[in-house]
Image (cartoon, coloured by chain):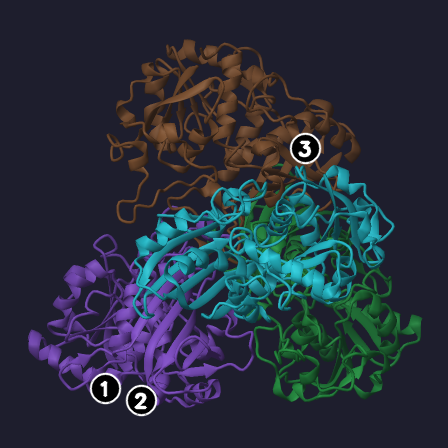
Chain colours: A cyan, B purple, C brown, D green
Amino acid sequence: MLKAAIVGATGIVGQQFIVALNNHPWIKVTAIAASERSAGRSYQESLTDPRSGALRWYCDEPPVAEVMGLQVQNASELDPTTVDIVFSAVESDQAQILEPKFAATTPVISTASAFRYEKDVPILIPGINSAQADLLKVQRKARGWKGFITPIPNCTTTGMAITLKPIYDAFGIRSVIMTSLQAMSGAGRSPGVLGLDIIDNIIPYIVNEEEKVQRETQKILGAFNGNAIQPAAFGVSCTCTRVNVREGHTESVFVSAEKPCEPADVAKVMREFAGDSTAGLPSAPKRMIVVHPDPFRPQPRLDRDTDKGMATVVGRIRKDAVLQNGIKYLLVSHNTKMGAARGAVLVAELLIKEGYIS
Amino acid sequence: MLKAAIVGATGIVGQQFIVALNNHPWIKVTAIAASERSAGRSYQESLTDPRSGALRWYCDEPPVAEVMGLQVQNASELDPTTVDIVFSAVESDQAQILEPKFAATTPVISTASAFRYEKDVPILIPGINSAQADLLKVQRKARGWKGFITPIPNCTTTGMAITLKPIYDAFGIRSVIMTSLQAMSGAGRSPGVLGLDIIDNIIPYIVNEEEKVQRETQKILGAFNGNAIQPAAFGVSCTCTRVNVREGHTESVFVSAEKPCEPADVAKVMREFAGDSTAGLPSAPKRMIVVHPDPFRPQPRLDRDTDKGMATVVGRIRKDAVLQNGIKYLLVSHNTKMGAARGAVLVAELLIKEGYIS
Amino acid sequence: MLKAAIVGATGIVGQQFIVALNNHPWIKVTAIAASERSAGRSYQESLTDPRSGALRWYCDEPPVAEVMGLQVQNASELDPTTVDIVFSAVESDQAQILEPKFAATTPVISTASAFRYEKDVPILIPGINSAQADLLKVQRKARGWKGFITPIPNCTTTGMAITLKPIYDAFGIRSVIMTSLQAMSGAGRSPGVLGLDIIDNIIPYIVNEEEKVQRETQKILGAFNGNAIQPAAFGVSCTCTRVNVREGHTESVFVSAEKPCEPADVAKVMREFAGDSTAGLPSAPKRMIVVHPDPFRPQPRLDRDTDKGMATVVGRIRKDAVLQNGIKYLLVSHNTKMGAARGAVLVAELLIKEGYIS
Amino acid sequence: MLKAAIVGATGIVGQQFIVALNNHPWIKVTAIAASERSAGRSYQESLTDPRSGALRWYCDEPPVAEVMGLQVQNASELDPTTVDIVFSAVESDQAQILEPKFAATTPVISTASAFRYEKDVPILIPGINSAQADLLKVQRKARGWKGFITPIPNCTTTGMAITLKPIYDAFGIRSVIMTSLQAMSGAGRSPGVLGLDIIDNIIPYIVNEEEKVQRETQKILGAFNGNAIQPAAFGVSCTCTRVNVREGHTESVFVSAEKPCEPADVAKVMREFAGDSTAGLPSAPKRMIVVHPDPFRPQPRLDRDTDKGMATVVGRIRKDAVLQNGIKYLLVSHNTKMGAARGAVLVAELLIKEGYIS
């Protein structure tokens, strides 16, 4: 069993890591780290509201008994050599400082955006761009680290990149236009989205989100020559909105393909898409993409939990008459499962299987 | 004062007509018609639940006392010569039968889609395509009617067509891609959208909606030569979804213009857009388009009621890097005010001013 | 294996029966009945929207493959002797006609209210008033039936009756005052609760609900002498409201006990309450009542699915200073699991175990 | 015109004061105070998000132009002698420190709870207990102040106290049992209620709320002998919950009266209730209580804004069979209008009319 630390463990993403690693066949949580304020107390204590005694636990799944008793360490004093993997769930400004310290000795898998756009850092989605993991060797060498930093994508990028991959492989892509209808959980809890603001409403702006999705999609689907990633050449243009949904991002995608393709062709390549290198990974979905024939699907409440929240569910694949070789569809992707902690655990599994972590 | 009948008066759109015409300076409701089942009772009675005594009144505005006492007539037996205008709020299959009967003698302004796609029928938005009203002369002649039928657009078309108009005039349009996030009120009440289905959810499909928006937008912005409308040549591609919002459609629009244009240029032409021929119309908004500088706007709950729900509110005008001369923005349009009864009353006002109704 | 028919199978409660009986160790669904309109088609076909091809399946759990192929029978022509149990999920007016026909030969377990208030009909909650099952012998004799009719309570009664039982046994009850905050699923789908009506709102009235809860609670907790039930003497007064929650009724209960009792005493008798006669029943919850120490619980979304929706979750047990020996608390009960189909299956299990069905 | 300062002006209640005093015939806002952080900037600037330029304005009504240009003062350095009234919208811990400083020279009307339970402090609702204003003379004398502190009640107390008053006067009250379904706006914005937590859910606990309602109701309806308030002798027992409603608290009330009374009697005394001393007050509702005959009312979305949010709307007045002379009903009260800033302005108007402020 590999030993893992969760850094930023008291937050909502940190809690999701604990759930995602519960009874994991290859990885065991042995260290819990958070801010200085929480350090020195048991994890259970650190989550307990002193006034009411209520447990601030935000996952649908119950707390994991064996982790609740671990003592929380101060993240800035964590010794990364005591573990084999660090899962980092801190905010980006913290990640900027902490992750390189850990990476000097230990592999770091991060949900933060801090390092996503650096040249020697891949943004991995197992099954989509597994081969880009080789860039970690370049990173180690360039930075003189024994470990490495590998961030997962923004949760809004994940589902779209997955569904674009089989289209890109089969027909090529000229450009992508996307409008997202994102769930509240993507905004976290501090401050998060107030009920007052979202009831009977839509928030039409998510700061920095569109830029992230555009840039990350090109990098994930970029060409890798063993030394560097050449971002995919197609343009991506997004409008990202927040809607009154708890979990599960819905995205309305319009694609201009390089080659002519019919909706049935696209459905076929999506259905048959197996993903590279995910065979045998415990958290991998059975199918990366589930194509729904019912025109009223996908719906976030009904489809987000497909295959434990690890599959991307697609529907309404139709011809778009405006774009050259245009195709349009909708997708639902679970932003806090495949799009966050479980997605990061899947990356860990790939890197273990491929020998990057041991 | 012109006399008006409201047909389909017991439904939600019919009720909105009554509110929209309350204290109107030019038009007075003198006849109320509905299905045979309601006929013969007072309007008040026809809306009263016999079991509980509750009034089935669905507008935010209170019921209009003088109308509540009118006797409901059987729509299929209404004598249209007793009024100067018929406002039709019936379903499309009913409209197909009833509206030509009324139009033989009397102008009919309709919210139904039944006649929208006929060659001699304009789809009017005062301020956008007022000149197309002249097609009503062709219609009268071709059909041998003293009256005419003029339907308003689908509520999802309205806001988009309004915002495209100044872009089209100033820069030309190559194509439009749009994703809508539509309010529940657009689905009406029978059956409407169940709370069970929309809570924590999105419905990604609205039957026939996308086709309507695509076709109507081209017709509204089409060229009129006095005899026929040549639909605008640009393509329109939509994905229409339903979200948990009560009133106010939000639309995420991507436009490829003919000529280069910057976001500031587009904001300027929208802000300065006055609309043709709406001066002096009692229901016309002060500005057809309100451009909001705050990037977190427009929001349906905050912006739908701008200028009594008659203005279209736009925000986040940005460059789109994917489309040729690409511009993207969001809009909010009140689907049951400008997009339904009040919008139809505005058409009546235009036609009165221009002498088509007297 | 006992053979079961589900009558009213195309509705939402009928579908829940199919899910509740999936892989049941004692009972197998062998007949499906619905209105004449659905008869003759496969169950799958009868649920398929002819226009869009969408499956009208309303449970969170997936459809059950082996049932989807059964042919739907006309409920009014169903031969009850082909099965060992009839589960009836029809509306009350239908139940009035159909259930006695079935009961002439076959046990009928019903979610309808039609027979709940007849003298020789028990309203069973296994674990609470299992002994009242003996009234079925009286019913059979009086009506000359080989079968019987036994309805389950209204879904709002269930959780309250369960939590009152240990208080009643330990301390006696003088009176009960309750305000409910009920989920939308309790209103079903035709017409159900419109999203338009419940968004940002509360509906303060549910027709006939309060009377049902008051009467049923007294009957369930009444004394049974082998021949008749003497309703419990304590008064029950309710105000029932509908809130924007999908599943799970929340109830705010104030109890005046006969004997002095502290909140800790009440928590203890609730926690220790085992229920009579439910040992070995496959659908029985491990504990009938789960008492939550966190003052922010129970919450419907977090607690409704406790023990597969079969446990009643209680919290905030406090002293009430107004009533004599006053105690107040909140409860959450899953209205479409323990409060509907699964609760009816639990009744079937009890009656099988006790020899009433074989 | 009297000059008023608003302290805590940048928060949501502070903003509501600005709206409530817009175009007020007697009072003009001349000073704006907030925390040190906001001091020195214009009010407009202090509300502007530096990153996005968005205005953090939380009222439905638009910002008031003349106030936006006022310079924000540091609340702890505000000179209260520059104004005739201080409206305090700060949190309770701040109120404890600031309000006595202001009251030394100037009348303070507060939405904070800090001083509500002190013996020489009335909790005024004009129309309900206007005579208790005389306690302010006792307060001034006892504390040696030229000004005074007079807090308004908790927003959940207000509607219930108003509806109890005519019952208390006509029939006497033995006890009151109440369950509230409170709107999110009552929790403010920091941290407020997260959309994640309230979607498809109810929060069954609001810290300290029940104690406040119980205590304040007794004080408001207490007997005043010119020197002290003797709290009303009847018991009040509450359970307070939070539901997914934006504005408007709904309360389910059960009252045991001293004398027998029928629902029609209670409806009559409520309908005829005029309130004492509110004649001529600009913010006073036409009727303090509006009794709705429709059994599906009151509903918070439909009824909260009755008479500008200043009336309490009551419905479903029925007999309660459990309590002695029992009556039950539901009410809706606007928690951020009559229950907050507008309610405080109404108190100011009463005190101006009665000569306490000049």
Residue on which the image places disc 2: B276
Inspect the image, locate mark 3, and give the three-letter code of the amino acid beneath it: Val
- The tag earlier along the polypeptide, 1 or 2, is 1
Q: Which mark is residue C244?
A: none
Same chain letter for marks 3 and 2: no
Q: For residue D79, say whether it is visible.
A: yes
SS for tag 3? strand
Residue D352 image position (x, y, % from top left): 73, 79
Residue A138 vertical placement versus D174 (above, below):
below
Same chain letter for marks 1 and 3: no
Chain ID of residue with mark 3: C
- B268 or B77: nearer the eye? B268
Instruction: Answer with left or right where residue D88 lies relative to residue B177.
Output: right
**Are dots 1 and 3 in contact, CB under 8 Å?**
no
Residue in the picture at 60% in, 22% down: C128
Residue B287 vertical placement versus D179 (above, below):
below
Report, in whole angstroms, how far the alpha carbon at label 1 lies from the one at label 3. 70 Å
Report, in whole angstroms, how far the alpha carbon at label 3 lies from the one at label 2. 68 Å
Instruction: Answer with left or right where residue D280 lies relative to residue B303.
Output: right
Residue on which the image places disc 3: C290
Q: Image quarter for residue B13? A: bottom left
Inspect the image, locate mark 1, and give the three-letter code of the amino acid beneath it: Ala
Q: Residues within 10 Å of mark 3 (few under 14, many from 20)?
A: many
Q: Residues within 10 Å of mark 2 (few under 14, many from 20)?
A: few
SS for tag 2? loop
SS for tag 1? helix
Chain ID of residue with mark 1: B
Instruction: Answer with left or right where residue D273 lies relative to residue B64.
Output: right
Residue D328 vertical placement versus B164 (above, below):
above
Inspect the image, locate mark 2, and give the three-letter code of the amino acid beneath it: Asp
**Are dots 1 and 2 in contact, CB under 8 Å?**
yes
Residue on which the image places disc 1: B131
